[in-house]
Amino acid sequence: MMSDLQKYVLNPPLHTQAFFSLVDATANLVGVSEKYWQSKGLNGARIRILVEIAKEGGSILPSVLAQKIGVTKPNISLLLIPLENEGLIRRATHPKDGRKTIISITNEGQSLLLNHLPGNRQGIAEQMKGLEAQELDQLIALLTKLNRSINK
């Protein structure tokens, strides 16, 4: 039984090796990012929500936001409460469909991102400096291709 197990853990197929290399690199970079946010007294998950809202032009439906960050619709409401309490987002009735709510980033939320994203991005860039620009372009192209094949 142990020999069967060892073939999976000691000599995995190439696709499995690639998967775990990707997982390890992602975990390391997320760790760097989280350390940055913690050093500023901030929560990386909440920052991600603000970034996703900003990427959508400043407003987003909660259901779309939930999908983008990979949580359920009920959970997104719980995640939004602290951001709303801190004045970083606001909820309003959707202008075209009064049954829906729209989430918008406030000026305070935008200022928070403008003050802290450059430092966070610099920390990530430092960790990735081992790759040259051409290698980064290749990595982006490969990950884009992988994401397209996964999402089919």
Image: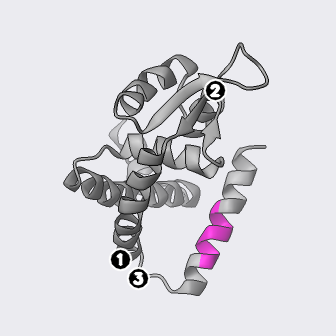
Left or right: residue 146 compared with residue 128: right
Amino acid on which disc 2 is placed: Ser
Q: Report how far apart the C-alphas of labels 3 and 1 lie in the structure.
A: 8 Å
* Marks 3 & 1, CB-CB < 8 Å contact: no
Which mark's residue is nearer the viewer, 3 or 2? 2
Q: Which residue is mark 1?
A: 126
Chain-order first, disc 2 or disc 1: 2
Q: Which residue is mark 2?
A: 63
Element under label 2?
A: helix
Q: Quadrant of the N terminus?
A: top left
Which mark's residue is nearer the viewer, 2 or 1? 2
Circle 2 packing at 10 Å, graded few (<14), some (14-19), many (20+), is some
- Which residue range is magenta in the image? 137-143
Q: Quadrant of the C terminus?
A: top right
Which numbered tag is attached to residue 130? 3
Circle 1 packing at 10 Å, graded few (<14), some (14-19), many (20+), is few
Q: Report how far apart the C-alphas of labels 2 and 1 lie in the structure.
A: 34 Å
Q: Residue at x 34, y 68 (%)?
A: 119
Vertical placement of residue 71 versus 19, above or below: above
Say which quarter of the image contains residue 70. top right
Image colouring: one colour
Element under label 1?
A: helix
The x, y position of residue 64, in whole percent, is 65, 32
